Image (cartoon, rainbow, N blue to C red):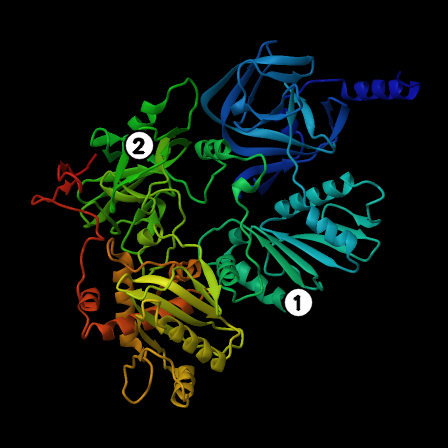
Amino acid sequence: MFSIFEIVKEKIVRWCLRARTVSALELFNGSNPQEVEIDDSNGVLKFISSGTTDLLVQTPTGWSSIKRTLKTVPYRVYRLGLEDGKFLECADEHLVIDENDAEIMVKNAKPGQLIKTKSGSSKVISVDISDRHENMFDLELDDENHVFYTNGILSHNTQCAAGFLLWYAMFKRDQTILIASKGQAHAIEIMDRIRFAYEECPDWLKAGCTMYNRHSIAFDNGSRIISQATTEKTGRGYSISLLYLDELAFTRPNVQQALWASIFPTLSTGGACIITSTPNGDTDLFANLWRGSVSGTNEFKPFVALWNEHPERDESWKQMMIGSLGPLLFRQECECVTGDTLINIKGGRKRVKISELYEFGVQVKGETQLIPNSRNLLVFTPLGYKHFSGVSRVWHDRTITVRFSNGLQLTGSFKHRVQRNLYKFSMLSELKVGDSAIGVNGAALKVSHIRVNDFGEYLYDLMDVDGGHIYYTNGILSHNCEFLSSDPLLISSIKLNTLRSLSHINEDGMFKFWAEINPSMSYLVGCDVASGTGSDFSTIEVIEFPSLRQVAELRSNQISIPQLYGRLKWIVNYLARPAQSNKAPEVYWSWENNGIGHAIGALYANDENPPLGELVSTDPKNAGVNTNGKTKILACLQLKSLVEKTRNNLQISSEMLLHELKNYVATGGSYAAKSGATDDLVSGVLVCLQILKYLANFDENAHKMVYSYDDDSAGVNLDGDGNLLNPDDDEPIPFLCM
């Protein structure tokens, strides 16, 4: 039974509110909205305006205060229809509640499902998808359940937890935690999550508060949490114990650098830092810090949060996310072309529109946005015909058309990427008249005209194309669903995306081994020397010959030069020892003798029991190999040739070596690691290639590797008329054009 007080309270509330019904638009417009930029959990802009109101909203437990009203970017309109006549127009991922209190995205609602409403549960009779795109409206409630009625249907507004920062403040004394995000609204959003987590804690667990507002929380243990927008002056004046930088990659580069320059001295004296972000290019501060964490050149520890680490997310969830695209991009980049774009297919008709592949797979009514490649069709790429996982479709309100001087044209999203040259991909929106892109015959296609289209249309993409995520669209080389470096890499990004590292089979003597020693093979051992003081890495690479397989590797920034020489001697003797057949592999070894490398030469000269095998030297006066501008360029070109070959190529086993190659770029007339990355393993391989050049003087296999350059890596075969040839049956494939 209700008490007299509760009855009177309810009457007063109803009188004040007049129990009136208003539209979401009316409510928002009356809340004094202000422009904001708040992203979703994937870093994609979601909310563009926010307001406050003193009105209450009806929930299953009564009337709840509205903390703020929110307006979204335009979303495609979905219409949920129920058996009792109630309906709801909303975004595809709007959450409603079923009879078991489970959250259901509207796009996943099925006819017959029971959905909770103001008057009880009601069956879903339809989920219709319109062609309209409209701004949506949401409410953030001061309510622990975060559910309210919309058109009489129970809806949910989402909250996320920030438990670690709260724990850090409540259980550590005299700490100052600074939260910085790309905008003030976003920083407040993070603080709201922390406040919610605090309010959900039981009383016995909560630390006492001495300050509690939208921008800061202070506890009676002397710790406090402060939120600010990320600017050049963020954090100044504070002695920071823990800095949390959210979506750093989406802060302007100049702000990133200025912030880091001002705040890093504080952190270096004992403060800690957490940075979370999705990538936004590969040249900013976040990218440099990430590369440094992977390479071990800074104090950050790299962590990757993968979609499948969530206990409720499986392969079907993955396919759903890939299919949904739109504001929830499953990958960093997933961009598309118009449906009339032509591609070459093996396993069906040779020349088809990309939309035909999609429409062929639509078997059910509704907005199916990913069609699997169930027929195992193959698409033509620079590396021949390759498999793809499926065809996606997504609506874009604006597109861009690029026409080339030979008459070819391509229409796609602003971020759709085409290949500019051997090293670089560019978005369509980045192209200018006079720029060039690569066509199927390898010729440079000049841009002659660019047009922006303000009408919306469906765009399509092939998903997960093998061999580097590239395929030809209207005769122009395009890229699907993978981030690419914008810098000129030594090794083609196309090839790099096809390489996979291996798990090592054992570790011994500080070395990782990927294969057993074969007495019928020879071995090349190259050493790059560092000081061992924690900066650059000393490395030793072992390449099997003539298979050109990487079989062992050492990498350390703590090993001293005498210790390094000892490890070099150990691996050479280990490789050169006779096998059970009494046959010993031939071992050729050396080190880079530039600068600090002379110290290895001195140790070798004074070694009364030098390593076995054959020492290779490029200078009779100085042991080891010398690397100057000319020899390095030649060795780099040799490395490029041996890696990019499709047959008899250099086989990379090491994950870290592959990581270095993905960040090994042209700079100052030569090649080196980009900022934040390392190239010491690459240097070890370059020493091995100088040894290979020495072997070419008397070994036929080595001579072919060094001086013969096959063109099988091109992957494009042409007939006498310049038409593409099927690599399998030599059937001509017509040049594609619109």
Label 1 close to label 2 by CB (< 8 Å) = no
View extreme (top): residue: 84
Vertical comparison of 635 with 714: above or below: below
- The quarter of the picture where the C terminus appears is top left
The secondary element bearing badge 1 is classed as helix
Q: Position of residue 657 (x, y in %)?
A: 40, 62
The numbered dot on residue 266 is 1
Q: Residue at x 74, y 33 (%)?
A: 144
View extreme (left): residue: 720
Q: Quadrant of residue 710?
A: bottom left
Q: Could you classify mark 1 by the number of other residues whose Cα lies within 10 Å: few (under 14), some (14-19), or many (20 or more)?
A: some
Q: Residue at x 76, y 43 (%)?
A: 198
Q: Is residue 324 visible?
A: yes
The amino acid beneath tag 1 is Thr
31 and 400: which is toward the camera: 400
Name the residue tied to disc 2. 376
Relative side of 219 to 710, left or right: right
Q: Residue at x 62, y 25 (%)?
A: 24
329 and 626: which is toward the camera: 626
Q: Position of residue 684 (x, y in %)?
A: 37, 71
Relative side of 421 to 276, left or right: left
Calculate the distance from the C-alpha at mark 1 to the C-alpha at mark 2: 56 Å
Relative side of 686 to 695, left or right: right
The numbered dot on residue 216 is none
The amino acid beneath tag 2 is Asn
The secondary element bearing badge 2 is classed as loop
- The quarter of the picture where the N terminus appears is top right
Vertical comparison of 236 with 734: above or below: below
